[in-house]
Image: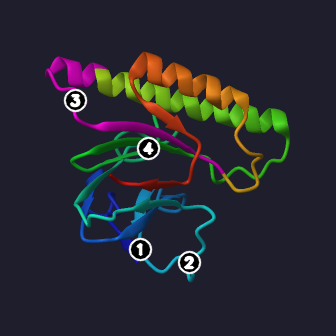
Amino acid sequence: MLLGTGRQNHQSVSVLGMKKFFFIDDNEQIGHCVTVTGNDNIIDITRLFKVVNPQNENIAIWAVDGCFFLKGRAPEHCDCIFFNNKDFCFAEFKFNSTTTNLQTINDNRKKAINQLRSMIIMIDERFGKFNYNYLGYNVEAYLCTPETYPSKNNAISDFAVEFIETYGVRLYEENIKILS
């Protein structure tokens, strides 16, 4: 079942509540991120990002790529942002990559990190204009890669240090988020 499909509702933000978990799919047919609910034993979760919501809180999901910005257009941006009253998360999905070439994998990771970085800077600038900040939020960025990718490398660790020192944002290469 698809929820909050943005374009159909002409909205780029949807709110999902009262779900213990759900998935975010960067749906190529629709052209942007959508939420998917269902039993992870039944649906194919290899191309999905799982969000665990132990408190059953409302979560806002902002489909950035394909809704707020045209897909593939400048400025660089991530696929989606999701947040509740404690967590604020940026996510970039590279699940559609099927390469096993290590250089291409590294290039894909760097591109995703650049997209996350650009979106963080953009949001920081916009928040600053209105005197908003992330005070009190757990701010994280997720680079979501296929299971076929080799495990994280040192380059991700170097970027993770940059993200926390420069932006105050933790960077993970993970396909799951357990909300606070």
Label 2 secondary element: loop
Q: How many marks?
A: 4
* Circles 4, 3 touching at the beta carbon (< 8 Å): no
Look at mark 3 in the image and give the residue it sits on.
Answer: 135
Count neighbours of disc 3 (C-alpha within 10 A) and say few if under 14, some if 14 to 19, many if 20 or more: few
Residue 134 forms part of the magenta stretch? yes
Q: Which residues are magenta?
A: 125-145
Q: Give the mark nearest the N terminus, 1 or 2.
A: 1
Residue 114 tag number: none
Residue at (64, 31) in percent of width and height? 156
* Distance in Å between CA atoms under marks 2 and 4: 24 Å
Give the label, 3 or 2, closer to the camera. 3
Placement of 101 over or under 3, stated as above or below? above
Find disc 2 in the rendering and name its residue.
43
Q: Is residue 158 left or right of residue 92?
A: right
Check disc 4 and report the residue beneath it.
Answer: 65
Q: Are marks 3 and 2 in contact (CB under 8 Å)?
A: no
